[in-house]
Image (cartoon, rainbow, N blue to C red):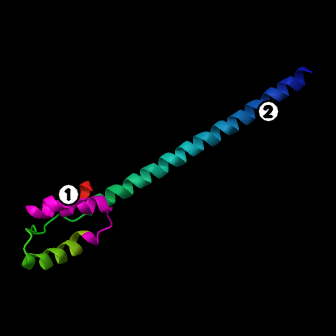
Amino acid sequence: MWEYEAQLRQEKMRAETAVWKGQQQIIIETKEREIEMERKARETAVNLPKLSIAPFRGTPKDRIRFSNQFMAQVDCQPINKVMKLGYLLQSVRGGCQERIGNTMKL
């Protein structure tokens, strides 16, 4: 009888140990994925170009130049739309900046 109870306790401990090890492995794998995602995000952020677009002031002549520069330097980059909008807001002046800001309030 004692032997049977001892054997049951050992089996229970082995099962609990296996569950604990499985949980620890899941935690390790999750942290490794988080670290990899953060590394990729840093690489993307580091590789972004410096914003060197002459500001757009709203004149019709300036529109084509600005549009081409913005598309080539910012829009084609693998960044999210919020960051692209930030670049756009930094690149326009005067009434253009106000109009873009007003459309975001809608």
Q: Check the image and name the residue furthest to the top.
A: 2
* 2 or 1: tag closer to the N-terminus: 2
Residues in magenta, as a range? 75-103
Q: Main secondary structure of the magenta part?
A: helix
Seen at 13% across and 67% down, the residue is 52
Q: Amino acid at mark 2?
A: Glu
Label 2 – label 1 distance at C-alpha = 68 Å
Expressed as whole percent of the image width and height from the top left, the position of residue 57 reads 7, 68
Seen at 27% across and 59% down, the residue is 83
Compared across the picture, whether 44 is left or right of 62 comes to: right
Callout 2 crowding tier (Cα within 10 Å): few <14, some 14–19, many ≥20: few
Q: Front-most of 40 and 14?
A: 40
Residue 48: mark in rendering: none
Q: Is residue 65 above or below residue 8?
A: below
Quarter assignment of residue 66: bottom left
Quarter of the figure that contains the C terminus: bottom left
Q: Amino acid at mark 1?
A: Asn
* Residue that badge 1 annotates: 102
Q: Is residue 40 above or below residue 59?
A: above
Quarter assignment of residue 68: bottom left
Expressed as whole percent of the image width and height from the top left, the position of residue 41 reads 35, 56
Seen at 19% across and 61% down, the residue is 100
Compared across the picture, whether 68 is left or right of 9 comes to: left
Q: Check the image and name the residue furthest to the right.
A: 1
Can residue 93 be seen from the camera position used here? no
Q: Is residue 86 magenta?
A: yes
Q: Is label 2 in a helix, a strand or a loop?
A: helix
Q: Front-most of 75 and 9?
A: 75
Residue 11: mark in rendering: 2
Seen at 26% across and 70% down, the residue is 75
